[in-house]
Image (cartoon, rainbow, N blue to C red):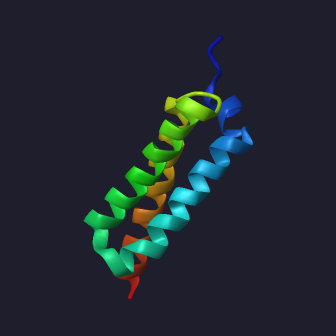
Amino acid sequence: MRMNFFELIKQRDKQQHFFICLLLTLISIPFLGVLFSTLLTFFVGVSKETWDKYYGSGFCWYDMLANLYGWSLGLLLYGLFQWYQ
């Protein structure tokens, strides 16, 4: 069964992936820079999904998509903040 976008974003798990990656990006960029912050966020997301594959509910590409959206918004907000200053 395929779910539509609005059903997916209502899931608490997807919201947690989004906000964790958003916060991780916003907190790590000033210290690590964009490249290493991106790598950190990516590896945290992949590690969580790998753990889920073996010990949880299974690997979910929609969780990875939520991670990407959180990272993207974090990068955008950081860029806007830097531009505004």
Residue 76 quadrant: bottom left
Q: How many tags in the picture?
A: 0
Residue extending farthest front: 55
Q: Position of residue 5 (x, y in %)?
A: 61, 30
Q: Mark yes or no: residue 58 visible.
A: yes
Q: Going 52% across and 30% down the picture, which residue do you hit?
A: 59
Q: Going 63% across and 42% down the picture, which residue do you hit?
A: 14
Q: Position of residue 45 (x, y in %)?
A: 47, 48
Q: Position of residue 2 (x, y in %)?
A: 62, 15
Q: Nearer the viewer, residue 10 or 44?
A: 44
Q: Is residue 78 left or right of residue 53?
A: left
Q: Mark yes or no: residue 72 visible.
A: no
Q: Nearer the viewer, residue 67 or 47?
A: 47
Q: Going 66% across and 48% down the picture, which residue do you hit?
A: 15
Which quadrant would the N terminus be assigned to in this image? Answer: top right
Q: Is residue 82 left or right of residue 51?
A: left
